[in-house]
Image (cartoon, coloured by chain):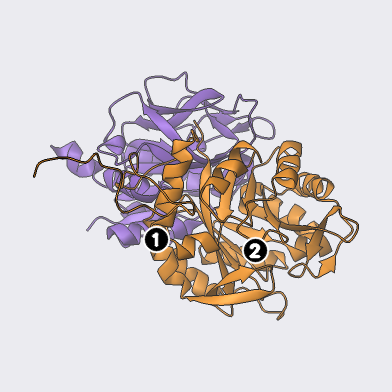
Chain colours: A purple, B orange
Amino acid sequence: MERVVIIDYGLGNLNSVKNALDFIGYPAIISNKKEDIENADYLILPGVGAFSEGMKNLQSLGLIEILKKEVLEKKKPILGICLGMQLLAEESEENGIHKGLGFIKGKVERLKTNLRLPQVGWNNIIIKKDSILLKELPDDNFYFVHSFAFQEKIEDIVTSTCNYGNDFAATIQKDNIFGTQFHPEKSHISGIKLIRNFLNFKKEEKK
Amino acid sequence: MLKKRLIPCLILRDNILVQSIGFNRYLPIGKPEIAIEFFMNWDVDEIILLDINATKQNRKPNLKMIEFISKNCFLPLTVGGGINTIEDVRNVLKAGADKVSINTAAFSNPELIVESSKAFGRQAIVVSIDVKKNSSGDYEVFLGSGKKSTGFEPVEYAKKMESLGAGEILLNSIDKDGMKSGYDLSILKKVSDSVNIPVIACGGVGKMEHFVEGIQQGHASAVSAANIFQHIEQSTIVAKAILKKYGVDVRLISKANYDDFEFDEFGRVLKSPKIEKTTWY
């Protein structure tokens, strides 16, 4: 059985992600311990909150170096959810410019829209590129709650976009690094399927 | 495009799901976990759970129940009732809620909205506002199931809550509660148009067309109701079908398709859709 670690860095509703994994049948653990992350087969970086706060917490828990080693060197699959996806970027302009993990080229910008912010609710994604994450989804609507997002210009890694006044990146993939701007753990059957797809990454890779 | 949301509001009294009429009569319905299990698979977009006598009884939120319910709730879950301190907010979110709904404490301790939106993000903070017409015929915000006057005009109050850090407004009409005559569209529209955060309409839905009015005339971002969902078969799926019929952009998950169906005035599916008489015999 694959070991899934939900990275606890003090932000976000970690239990909802765990509930979704329990439902699929993967007993995940919520942890920020070095050995747990090293022993994991899959990593999930959830998160709700401010970018700078997220980076500060990752830094003070000593997680940045561990993640760099596991994700960039050992190529461990990681799924960043919402703020977790944004943290994978080089930098964000939320409350001033802040440096991110830099796993993925690109910047996080405020949504360019005249509509109400944050965007709260169900919106449909438009698939741009094949990705294991988006395979055989029962529906294309997902639950979003955010004011910032990855710029969608970095086309080679953007696997789907979403429109809220303007297009932004809804999902990204670069090799073993995945991100969703929406919350799959709260997106009903489509979200459950997407998480299940993520956990099939290693199997698919071997094929 | 962002979809308009349909949200059942589950009203709990002493941990039993009830139907509320005018904020003063309550009829028991059953166990909340069973309702949630059904709603999860009935095309709704979110779930709101309100414990309406927690504050009155000076009771803390029932964390065990929230934990139990959220275990199988893969939709955004908002929990309200008895949330008075930042610790309460933290505990309820930790137990599995995605948002908290704050009513009385938003009035008595506005600092709570500031602090909790800073700590957990404004998306997690829903301010619930109960309005009714006061003795001089003006709309006013009331507390304590409509018994305590605040002196606040609803639009000003909603704007104040937005500036303090509320992420959404749940606007409930006391006069309309349980009356089945539709939302109070005039105050709903005024509040929706004056704030920049989503407004969820609640109170008064008696037939499915009222959801359409709430969105098209009341400018709500989401429509909520309690009683109608409990007493009409396939209620939420039919509600979505009717919203779609009137051109509202909604998320449709259910395999049930009501495109060619007729409904009665309450939204019940007419069992025998109109069929041309054939002369096969």
Residue A144: give x, y in percent of width and height: 50, 41
Residue tagged by mark 2? Answer: B89
Position above or below: B268 against A125? below
Residue B159: give x, y in percent of width and height: 79, 44
Residue A58: give x, y in percent of width and height: 54, 47
Residue B91 can be seen, yes or no:
yes
Residue placed most toward the observer, A34 or B98: B98
Residue lying at 71% horizontally and 74% vertically, measured from the top left: B55
Residue lying at 74% horizontally and 44% vertically, measured from the top left: B186
How packed mark 2 is, by other alpha carbons closer than 10 Å (few <14, some 14-19, many 20 or more), is: many
| Upstream in sequence: badge 2 or badge 1 | 2
Residue placed most toward the observer, B95 or A1: B95
Q: Is residue A126 left or right of residue B157?
A: left
| Secondary element at image label 1 | loop
Position above or below: B31 against B89? below
In contact (CB < 8 Å): disc 2 and disc 1: no
Q: Amino acid at mark 2?
A: Val
Of badges 2 and 1, the one in the foreground is 1
Residue A34 can be seen, yes or no:
no
Callout 2: chain: B
Q: Are marks 2 and 1 on the same chain?
A: yes
The quarter of the picture where residue B172 lies is: bottom right
Residue placed most toward the observer, A195 or A93: A195
Residue A78: give x, y in percent of width and height: 37, 43
Q: Is residue A25 left or right of residue B241?
A: left
Label 2 and label 1: CA atoms lie apart by: 35 Å
Position above or below: A74 against A39? above
Count how many numbered circles sit on residues in the image: 2
Callout 1: chain: B
Residue tagged by mark 1? Answer: B233
Q: Amino acid at mark 1?
A: Glu
Residue placed most toward the observer, B79 or B15: B15
